[in-house]
Image (spheres, rainbow, N blue to C red):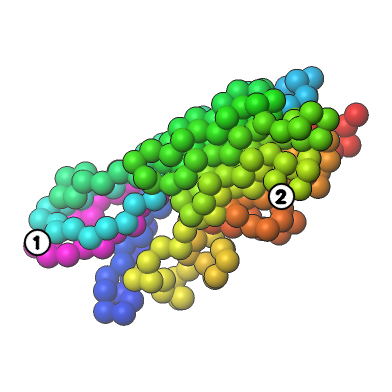
Amino acid sequence: GGNAEYTYNGKRVHVFTSPGTLSVDVPIGSIEYAIIGGGGAGGGTPYAAAAAGGGGGAGGYVTSTSEVRSDVTVTVGPGGSPNPNTSGNNGTDTTLTGGLSAIGLGGGYGAGNASDGNHGGSGGGGAASAGEGGASELSQGEAGGDGSGTAGIDSNAGGGGGGYGGAGGNSGSPNPGSGGTGGLGVQVPSTFQDPTNPYGGDGPSGTFWFAGGGGGGGQNDPAGEGAGGGQPSPTGTPWAGAGHGGAFPPPNES
């Protein structure tokens, strides 16, 4: 079953990027799995509100081994949908049911318009003007960053969404006026890292990275956008499937 099957280091790997069934003809004494919930959407804000949104939290990440004696139904949770004028939506859970039971929680949404980020696998970032980051649930990630900051410097910048490997940064970090950096993601176990079948996003070391948090929106300057997935700066491709934050106000608008 799955969208792709291949053999790597003597083990059969099944990759599901959409719903399906892992067919089990005979009991399997030990199966290793890694699942990731859908990421939360970042927050937006009306232009007149003068407060950037928070970054979306990563979907929850779970890896373990288990005995399997019957077919496993796989539901792959999509990411949350954004809203340009308010908070986004949480990502959807990824689940394994039937012969194996496991859940990767959807990520918490990033806040919009001076509100708090939501809880989820990883928590979403808080919007500017003292919005708080959301919490992580079931130890499947980290919390989102806060959108509070210093008036006139970065009080209008949003916090970053949490990732599995690190919490989202608060607004104004690492630089005054910047949106918070999204939390670092995680690289799946080496069992799945067949170089001839790459998937996932880039990260600090190669590919196969997932569950990075989205960057928070910056204040007044495109250079203030938060970096996604724990990347040092938002100039390159964000890490671990995350997204960079946007600027407030939008570029070329006054």
Q: CA distance from mark 2 to mark 1?
A: 51 Å
Residue 22 in the image, given as x and y percentages of width and height: 23, 55
Residue type at mark 2? Pro
Residue 193 in the image, given as x and y percentages of width and height: 41, 71
Would you call the spot at circle 1 few (<14 residues within 10 Å), some (14-19), or many (20 or more)? few
Residue position marked by numbered label 1 in the rendering: 27
Q: Is residue 112 visible?
A: no
Left or right side of 222 for 184: left
Left or right side of 11 for 199: right
Residue 163 in the image, given as x and y percentages of width and height: 51, 48
Q: Tag on residue 9?
A: none
Q: Dividing the image into 4 quarters, which one contains the C terminus?
A: top right
Query: How many marks overall?
Result: 2
Residue position marked by numbered label 2 in the rendering: 174
| Quadrant assignment, res 251 | top right
Circle 2: element type = loop
Residue 199 in the image, given as x and y percentages of width and height: 47, 63
Q: Dividing the image into 4 quarters, which one contains the N terminus?
A: bottom left
The outermost residue toward the front is 150
| Residue segment shown in magenta | 19-44
Q: For this rendering, which residue is in front, 170 or 117?
A: 170
Q: For this rendering, which residue is in front, 119 or 154?
A: 154
| Residue 34 is one of the magenta-drawn residues | yes
Q: Residue at x 56, y 63 (%)?
A: 203
